[in-house]
Amino acid sequence: MEETYLYDPNLLLKLDFHQSPAKFNPFISAACPGETWLKVRPLKDSDFDRGFLQLLSQLTHVGPVSRTQFLTRFSQMKSTGDYYVTVIEDARKNEIIAAASLVIERKFIHNCAIRGRLEDVVVNDTYRGKQLGKLIVVTVSLLARYLGCYKMTLDCKDKLIKFYESLGYVLVPGNANSMTIRYDDEPSTAKHNLTSFNSLTNDSPPAEACQTVSLDFNS
């Protein structure tokens, strides 16, 4: 059965990793991730069977998502053209071991510009220490730049600020707070209505402090 990519994988081959302030030792990129068995690529519709959802569960609550639900959401994301879920696969095990998402926001401001948001960054616990977190974040950040985003933003826990600063992100003075209104603890009827508008969130729990950091491509 033919597999479908969420977006064109050739986009990743056009990224210039020398444009990133991130320091890799040894140097790696999406095209050459350091090991022959590592593959950096867009999410596929077949990644349901490669542990993609299980990987996300290391980051946050996922829930009992069926294959049908996964394929429906994949199709919705692909049809909009604004979702760039990117993964790293261990080809030896046929398993997804890292992931991050670029979500495009289309604006009226800045001459109808587009803004990128970095979401759902996760690396399998057993693969940490191999620069894969840095690699997946830099990949989607450079992808945002290549696609013409005027900036890229993310919300992160305080303890991760230094990591993202090392990749070029900065805390914006006077605009570095993260605020949330959650709908996933409402009664089931309200949940059903909100789901139809894709309004459920999976942000960090309120008890953990978050900051908004930004990567400005115009500066």
Image (cartoon, rainbow, N blue to C red):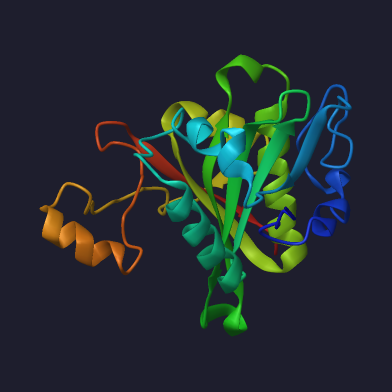
The residue sitting at 66% across, 66% down in the picture is 149
Work out whether residue 144 can be spotted: yes
Please determine whether, in this image, residue 106 is positioned above or below residue 20. Answer: below
Instruction: Give the quarter of the figure containing the C terminus.
Output: bottom right
Q: Residue 63 is drawn in which quadrant? A: top left
The residue sitting at 56% across, 18% down in the picture is 125
In this image, 132 relative to 58: left or right?
right
Quick one: 202 or 22, which is closer to the camera?
202
The residue sitting at 58% across, 83% down in the picture is 112
| Residue 188, x across and y down, in percent | 14, 54
| Residue 162, x across and y down, in percent | 57, 29
Please determine whether, in this image, residue 59 is positioned above or below residue 139. Answer: above
Please determine whether, in this image, residue 153 is positioned above or below residue 90. Answer: below
In this image, 175 relative to 89: left or right?
left
Count of marks overlaid on the render: 0
| Residue 140, x across and y down, in percent | 68, 49
Quick one: 13 or 67, which is closer to the camera?
67
In this image, 167 relative to 117: left or right?
right
| Residue 11, x across and y down, in percent | 81, 59
The residue sitting at 70% across, 61% down in the picture is 7
In this image, 40 relative to 31: left or right?
left
Work out whether residue 128 can be spotted: no
Quick one: 73 or 84, which is closer to the camera?
73
